Amino acid sequence: MNVQQDLDIEALKNGDRAEFAKLVDAYSGHIYRLALKITGNEQDAEDVLQQTFINTFKHIQNFEGRSSLSTWIYRVASNEALMVLRRDKKEVSIDQDFEDDNDEIAKPIELADWSRLPESEFQTAEASKMLDQAIANLPIKLRSVFVLRDLEGLSIRETAQALELTETAVKTRLLRARLNLREQLAHYFGEKSREDTK
């Protein structure tokens, strides 16, 4: 996502409402998706979306250009989503129990071979629902990295900047998230694979 080049940062900093409307149009879908995947609740996602743009408008003067505008907005949105989780006491902290980022990655219990499944099996509403549920089951520290990197398409560096983590921590958490999801979905896709070979 590179809409930053179409936005006039100076106009935004000068309070240009038309430019801010362009920013809202450009990022609303991305921020809502991010918030929904992190919070797992539509109302919370709408609150995060609204608060993200309020804070962006209030604090755009603080944007120094050390990261891209999109990364900066994702940082604001991620922080808002985490604040909602803390407020609702669904999760305590993104860094809780994260001292083990450099520990050896645990091997998943079951890894089914999905390579024989046709691509269409991964694009069904049922598969999408299963994936959404598996993402919602991820610990927040893994979920936030997975959503930013694999769903929103941020680079490792941008994800690290948005979450204020090291790139090594992002890579470790991303690997854990992917293994966790694969393990969660192993039974479902394993069954589909067996059905397909009958």
Image: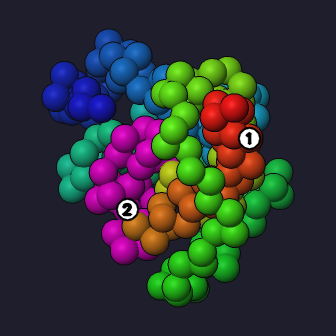
In the rendered image of this protein, does residue 29 appear above or below residue 116?
Answer: above
Q: Residues within 10 Å of mark 1 (few under 14, many from 20)?
A: few
Horizontal relation, residue 68 to residue 55: left or right:
left
Identify the residue at horizontal 35%, vertical 46% (top origin): 154
Secondary structure at numbered mark 2: helix
- Mark 2 or mark 1, which has the lower sequence index? 2
Identify the residue at horizontal 63%, vertical 34% (top origin): 197
Query: Residue 165 occupies which quadrant of the picture?
Result: bottom left
Q: Could you tell me the amino acid type at mark 1? A: Glu
Horizontal relation, residue 122 to residue 198: left or right:
left
Identify the residue at horizontal 74%, vertical 49% (top origin): 187
Residue 169 magenta-highlighted: yes
Q: Residue furthest front?
A: 198
Q: Is residue 195 visible?
A: yes
Residue 105 magenta-highlighted: no
3D distance between C-alphas at marks 2 and 1 = 36 Å
- Residue 190 or 36: which is nearer the viewer? 190
Residue corresponding to mark 1: 191
Q: What residue range appears in magenta?
A: 147-170
Horizontal relation, residue 97 to residue 170: left or right:
right
Which quarter of the image is occupied by the N terminus? top left
Whole-percent x, y for residue 90 in the image? 81, 55
In the rendered image of this protein, does residue 61 appear above or below residue 7?
Answer: below
